[in-house]
Amino acid sequence: MELKQYAKTVAKNARQASIELATATGDQKLNWLKRCAAELVARADEIVAANAKDLTAAEEKGLSSAMIDRLRLTPERLQNLADAVVEIGQLPDPVGEIFESCKRPNGLLVTKVRVPLGVVFFIYESRPNVTVDAAALCVKSGNAVILRGGSEAFHSNTVLYSVLKDCLKAEGLPENAVQLVETTDRAAVGEFLAKGDLIDVTIPRGGKSLIERVAREATMPVIKHFDGICHVYIDASADQAMATDITVNSKCQRPGVCNAAETLLIHKDAAARFWPALAAELQSKGVELRCCSESAKGIKDAKAATDEDYGTEYLELILSVKIVDSIEEAAGHIRQFGSGHTESIVTNSLQAAEYFQNQVDSSAVIVNASTRFNDGGEFGLGAEIGISTDRFHARGPCGLREIMSYKYVVHGTGQIRN
Amino acid sequence: MELKQYAKTVAKNARQASIELATATGDQKLNWLKRCAAELVARADEIVAANAKDLTAAEEKGLSSAMIDRLRLTPERLQNLADAVVEIGQLPDPVGEIFESCKRPNGLLVTKVRVPLGVVFFIYESRPNVTVDAAALCVKSGNAVILRGGSEAFHSNTVLYSVLKDCLKAEGLPENAVQLVETTDRAAVGEFLAKGDLIDVTIPRGGKSLIERVAREATMPVIKHFDGICHVYIDASADQAMATDITVNSKCQRPGVCNAAETLLIHKDAAARFWPALAAELQSKGVELRCCSESAKGIKDAKAATDEDYGTEYLELILSVKIVDSIEEAAGHIRQFGSGHTESIVTNSLQAAEYFQNQVDSSAVIVNASTRFNDGGEFGLGAEIGISTDRFHARGPCGLREIMSYKYVVHGTGQIRN
């Protein structure tokens, strides 16, 4: 009951702040972000000290060294974070932007104007810098945000939050524009998910079980971010060097992220030309190959791929491989096993490129470039709060516009309807 | 269990049809719509005969004459419906439209391409012509649709559906692109609402209790259409003739629809100039006035307005009235009592117009024109499947684009990520 009341109070405060924030000027928001950037650097000692508590707890809990590294804040990382915040501040103010208009025959000027969604509930399990990034994106887009970070970053998030809040106060913006859920009790999440009357959207970023729980319990819309089972398809006509670069980059450049490739589909003609060489190149980068019977032939150390492999997001240096007879078979495989995240084709055939981009239904379909480009920064959105695997409202990378709505503003000169 | 199986089969068929439909050409869809239009006219006798069964049942059930008239199909109404269908056909094909693009510094061309949502479940209680309109909009936008009409129009809908389906077959389009739920069992709706894995969006159009049920039970996103408690605000500087025309039109031109005005707010300076004359004009049109204590003064037959009145969507010739001291008070009243649907301001002050359009958060904010213009046709969307009171995905009138998603299509020349 106490938790219920807490969630209600926080959500109500966010709703009120969102009303005030919706009409804040671009300058106010920019000044806030500049001040946050300066304070992140000025208060680096305090932040690093709080972060040390999280790091100690993480070591005691026996988290992996990779996870501990993700958690770590250093003066250098805080400077990078400060730079990112200023970059978000310098993006054009999206609130009030007219992005479509039409003049009607009766003289009415009909415009579509971008407005904030209102209140965003953001749940994340990631690095503490996400706390600052998410707050920056939400406030810049005129949304109040309720932040629910992972328990492993609790001390770091708490001090970062105090920086954000102090700066809101100093710039005369509503203090409750950014709120942090100040308990690690998992039941608190459920209480916020029940507040569909006060919260406009929930964005969960984390493991599959978290996202499934949120989708099940939420009484408001959710922007989900599920698996990335991403494919590279090498077409018959593909250039060997380009195909090799793109496959290696898609798999190896950062294997633990959602837009890394998990499966390679290769046309039999291309396979005949250079699959053994490509396999050797992948293996030299430490990639374990799980192959169909055709692609396993003559490849040393190739393991056999099962259907389960083709449906797995490895997030490590493992690649499923299948040789296909046609581009139609490749598209069919992607429809059956893919997650609609990111697929790349490597080809020199215009017809093949057009077939692939029309038939493959994923948030990003990429011709002759790495799957790793499906990213808000790389697509020119400035920054992202996540990558949506939903089709509704927002798909793919979510920057400022994707956490916004619109209204029609219509200008007349006394028109009435007949 | 039988109903569960039925819903699953229909939804699966729709999903399969949506995959085929997503790559249909604009010509195929136009030819289908032209053929539908011709068949609606050619098969008018058959349609009118089926409609007669619904009309007889409606009379036996004692439906109001207004409702019976809405249900009625005549050769003339079928001709109008045929014309509307051709008009939808002639809109540009929205599937594959590139609506944003950006060239990145590394040479990648990032484009946002409009794609169908997939499968639409459309629940409606309205006139049988909605069956045809909705199917036309969904197929034109590349979506398969499952239609659930009202039981009172069951025979009419069934024959209209056979026209739509015969024409799909004749044009070589997937027959299951349009399916009608062939039972009036209310439990069927629940079975479809449980099919979140096969249906991409549910659009309910009807009474509040229907929409609330759908929002509660749906396992997929819903585009809701709730109350229209619409306001006309007459600012201090408003022109008397324009204010009178807009108020009368907003209230009286079609009082039973969601974008008709329910409340008049009038600045005390404007009230002092012409409220008694405006009140007399409204009363001469048969409007019952429910007034605040200030606006009741000197108005014959004025009833007292309660807070409940200000929160009521009358949908008939009744108008709540309140005199306000300032535009801020008007905006505050709208925030407290409005439903975020449509609000108009009548003013000659640029400052007042800007304040109103910035502060009032409704799907349409209209300066110097009637609230009745918040409509897909009037806004140039071609036609509409409903008016959304949601902020998520689609807000205001929903035409073709509002029942669509997008994907990123990216063209490179071998780029990899560093």
Image (tube, coloured by chain):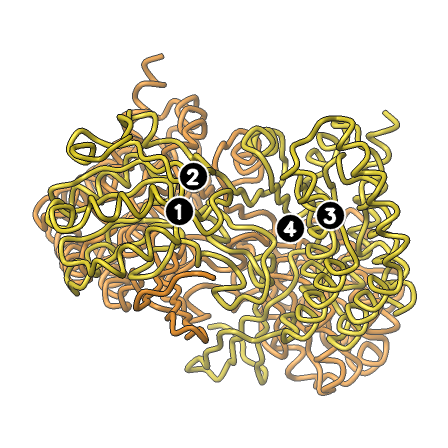
Chain colours: A yellow, B orange
Which residue is disc 4 drawn over?
A: B314
**Contact between labelled residues 4 and 1, with CB atoms less than 8 Å apart:** no
Relative to A60, does residue A276 appear above or below in the rendering?
below
Distance between the alpha carbons at the discs numbered 3 and 2: 26 Å
Q: Tell me the kind of residue under disc 2.
A: Leu
Q: Secondary structure beneath disc 3?
A: loop
**Label drawn at residue A317:** 2
At 37% from the left and 43% from the top, the residue drawn is: B120
Identify the image quadrant of residue A336: top left
Chain holding disc 1:
A
Chain holding disc 4:
B
Indicate the position of residue B319 as horizontal and vertical percent values. Answer: 69, 59
Q: Where, quadrant-wise, is the N terminus of chain B in this rendering?
A: top left
Q: Tell me the kind of residue under disc 4.
A: Tyr
Q: Tell me the kind of residue under disc 1.
A: Lys
Q: Tell me the kind of residue under disc 3.
A: Pro
Which residue is disc 3 drawn over?
A: A128
Which of the marked residues, 3 or 2, is nearer the chain's N terminus? Answer: 3
In-front residue for pair B370/A31: A31
Give the class, few, some or many, for how many residues have Cα within 10 Å of label 1's Cα (few <14, many ≥20). Answer: many
Distance between the alpha carbons at the discs numbered 1 and 4: 61 Å
**Label drawn at residue A251:** 1
User: Furthest-left residue in view?
Assistant: B170
Which of the marked residues, 3 or 1, is nearer the chain's N terminus? Answer: 3
The nearer-to-camera label among 3 and 2 is 2
Indicate the position of residue A158 as horizontal and vertical percent values. Answer: 85, 45
